[in-house]
Image: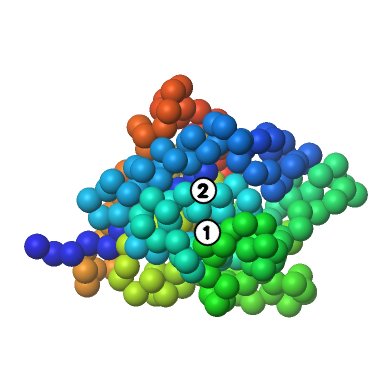
Amino acid sequence: MVRKQHIYFVRYGLTKYPLVENAGPFDSPLHPIYGYEQGIAISRKLASMPCPPEVVYSSSLHRSLSTSQMIVHAIGKTENSILVEDGLVEWLAPSLTVNKLPDGERLRIRSVQDRIDMSFTEIDPSYKSLNPIAQDPDNVPDGAPYFFETEEYLIEKRTKVTIDRIIEHADGKNICIVSHVPCAQAMALYLEGAPSIEESKIGPWPLGGITLFTREEGSEKWNLEMYADCSHMPGEYKNGLKEWSLPSLTK
């Protein structure tokens, strides 16, 4: 039987504070009851898959890290098991990173050590981001995240560089990526390889949705097996609630 590599893209559950575009808050923790209940459901779903994740890459934002924390415990990994990847951070557009435009406060991306100190002890401190955030907007390495990136740049540059480097780094292992809808949609679009956005199956993504791609060993072609599935989510969230989409993928 031909072995398949799996990539799971995961959106976190309900946050404590709703993210309002152009207002924030942009780094809310999960809801202390429902967000964690949903995170447990997501984790159990992944752990029960025939080919569960073997390595977990996460955005550095609180809601993604909390979800990753539950996932690594569910798959039997704890110490040095969350790889914090800058390339998976929220789309660095003004509406998603600056409150009270045009002169508000910009989202502060906390360091790995800050997150470890905040109780995310499962983070691997030795992991170096494969696509670090550019600090100088006038000197941005090709594909690096930066303030402020366009939707076109996110889709055509940042997420392509990020997922290619993650796949290479994982070296054939089954991957779990915990990120945000803009990044996850753009990476899914790239792996899907549809001739055009109009012909793509990638669309709005609800809270807790899991997307799965697989490819056979030795193949470069990724196959979309499951998109934004919420069958594992508790209560009404099983129906797929609080969807979000990049403007160009709104259908």
Report x, y in % for residue 197: 45, 47
Identified at 48% across, 41% down, the residue is 39
Dot 1: element = strand
Residue 242 makes an appearance in the image? yes
Q: Quadrant of the N terminus?
A: bottom left
The residue at which mark 1 appears reads as 58
Mark 2 or mark 1, whichever is nearer to me: 2
Residue 155 against residue 101 in the figure, above or below: below
Residue type beneath disc 1:
Ser
Whether residues under marks 2 and 1 lie with C-beta atoms below 8 angstroms apart, the answer is: yes
Identified at 30% across, 71% down, the residue is 172
Identified at 46% across, 27% down, the residue is 237
How many other residues sit within 10 Å of disc 1, few (<14), some (14-19) or many (≥20)? many
Dot 2: element = helix
Report x, y in % for residue 84: 56, 65
Say whether residue 62 is left or right of residue 35: right
Mark with earlier residue (2, 1): 1
Report x, y in % for residue 150: 66, 56
Residue 13 makes an appearance in the image? no
Residue that protrudes farthest toward the top in the picture: 236
Say whether residue 49 is left or right of residue 199: left
Depth check, front residue: 116 or 141: 116
The residue at which mark 2 appears reads as 67
Q: Estimate the spatial distance between the alpha carbons at disc 2 and disc 1, rounded to whole Å.
A: 9 Å
Residue type beneath disc 2:
Thr
